[in-house]
Image (cartoon, rainbow, N blue to C red):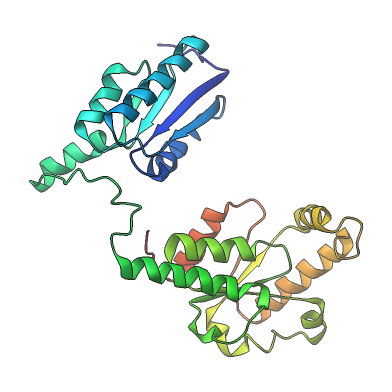
Amino acid sequence: MVMTNMAGQRTVFFISDRTGITAEMLGNSLLTQFEDVQFQRVTIPFVDTPEKIDEAVRQVNVTAEAQGRRPIVVSSVVSETMSETIRRDANALTLDLFQIFIQPLEAELGSKSSHAAGRSHGISNSHEYFARMEAINFAQAHDDGAATRELGKAQVILVGVSRCGKTPTTLYLALQFGVKAANFPLTPDDFADRVLPRSVLPFKDKLFGLTIAPERLHEIRQERRRGSAYAALDNCRYEVREAEQLMNREGIPMIDTTSKSIEEIAATILHRAKLARHIY
């Protein structure tokens, strides 16, 4: 059978009884497999009463009528009754995440699920929650070498030239995995001395390097300080070359961030640095 592309733009609704994060994460992972389709995404969170379910269904059906084609609904509504209402009344292709996965798990485990909303992104464990907040505060306090006190408490210290992705990566590691991550810049002074910054030398076993293509670094720096020597392509080439040579001499593991997402960079660091992977 030949599949015809009902191309153009398709509207996707992420409907959740809580934040919508679970539906968005899994749903977007599925949608990225369809590169020839443009998706308009609509998230409707906190749909936790029959009245809100009816309003969400109405919004889906209005869209279906206006566009002349069914939207796609990715639902993470836990309540069996409310999720059934979506499947029955919405003029849409409905992907019900909990019904797809919970029923087989119940059968396999011989146990009924609690069907309690908010378990995945609520504060179910106050110790873990505050540990994550502490990691975020740590990342902010130790951003770009701003503080060197308590660097020994860091689980990983990212090093690399300015604007290679150190700050967003440390924050993502803290927010998503509760990892205490610091970052420290490598500067022309370090290249002249041909040694690592003195502040991070005692923690060499915690260092992880980020590098980037000079051309991409030039583009990023131009957005920040257009026309400056700092952003000049020749300077970017010099800094990247010297930083890579320094990290190679010191045996620091390194990853090229040029074409990688923050998620991929973080996952690589967790794996290669053998850090405990806590999911929140």
Q: Is residue 16 left or right of residue 39?
A: left
Single out the residue that lies furthest toward the left. Answer: 110
The residue positioned 21% from the left and 40% from the top of the image is 102
Residue 276, can we see it? Answer: no
Give the image location of residue 186, x and y in percent: 72, 75
The residue positioned 51% from the left and 65% from the top of the image is 269
Give the image location of residue 39, x and y in percent: 54, 27
Q: Quadrant of residue 238?
A: bottom right
Single out the residue that lies furthest toward the front. Answer: 51
- Foreground residue among 115 and 32: 115
Q: Quadrant of residue 82?
A: top left
Residue 166, can we see it? Answer: yes
Q: Is residue 149 above or below residue 5?
A: below
The residue positioned 57% from the left and 62% from the top of the image is 169
Give the image location of residue 117, x and y in percent: 27, 45
The residue positioned 13% from the left and 42% from the top of the image is 106
Quarter the N terminus occupies: top left
Quarter the C terminus occupies: bottom left
Q: Is residue 128 above or below residue 16?
A: below
Count of marks placed on residues? 0
Q: Quadrant of residue 15?
A: top left
- Foreground residue among 157 and 2: 157
